Amino acid sequence: MQKETAASYKERNFKPVVEKCDGCERMVEEEGSKFCQSYLNPDAKWRLGICNFATHAKPEITVTKVRVNPLKAAKRASKGK
């Protein structure tokens, strides 16, 4: 289900995708090369970390648990009244 475009990706100066883009749903194959539908230079999107257009990679979110002292929490709650 590829859309017909007026000009090819090579004519519009799109650069081929990099290895990190493998598995992304935004890739389009044209004339034996793979291009990103969303960005001209995919390598630049991966320089600072994860590409924000990537559909196959999710950012890692770290959750830290904060330990609350129940005695201090009770004192703080009673001061508010």
Image (cartoon, rainbow, N blue to C red):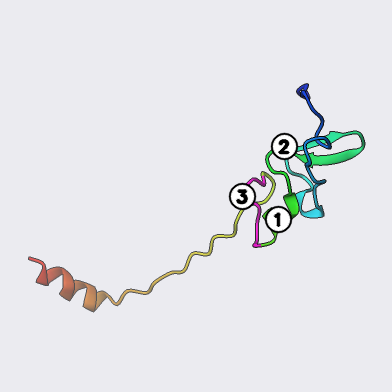
> Which residue sits at x=65%, y=62%?
48
Provide the residue designation for mark 2: 37
Distance between the alpha carbons at the discs numbered 1 and 2? 15 Å
Labelled disc at residue 44: 1
Q: Nearer the viewer, residue 41 or 77?
A: 41
Q: Callout 3: few (<14), some (14-19), or many (20+) C-alpha neighbours within 10 Å?
A: few
> Which residue sits at x=72%, y=38%?
25
Q: Nearer the viewer, residue 26 or 63?
A: 26
Secondary structure beneath dot 3 equals: loop
Label 3 sits on what residue type?
Asn
Q: From what the image shows, is residue 72 above or below residue 6?
A: below
Quadrant in the rendering for residue 5: top right
The residue segment tinted magenta is: 48-54
**Residue 37 % position (x, y):** 72, 37
Q: Quick check: marks 1 and 2 in contact, CB under 8 Å?
A: no
Provide the residue designation for mark 3: 52
Q: Callout 2: few (<14), some (14-19), or many (20+) C-alpha neighbours within 10 Å?
A: some
**Residue 51 % position (x, y):** 66, 52
Q: From what the image shows, is residue 67 above or below residue 12?
A: below
Tag nearer the camera, 1 or 3: 1
Left or right, residue 61 beside residue 80: right
Please identify the quadrant where the N terminus is shown.
top right
Q: From what the image shows, is residue 59 above or below residue 54?
A: below
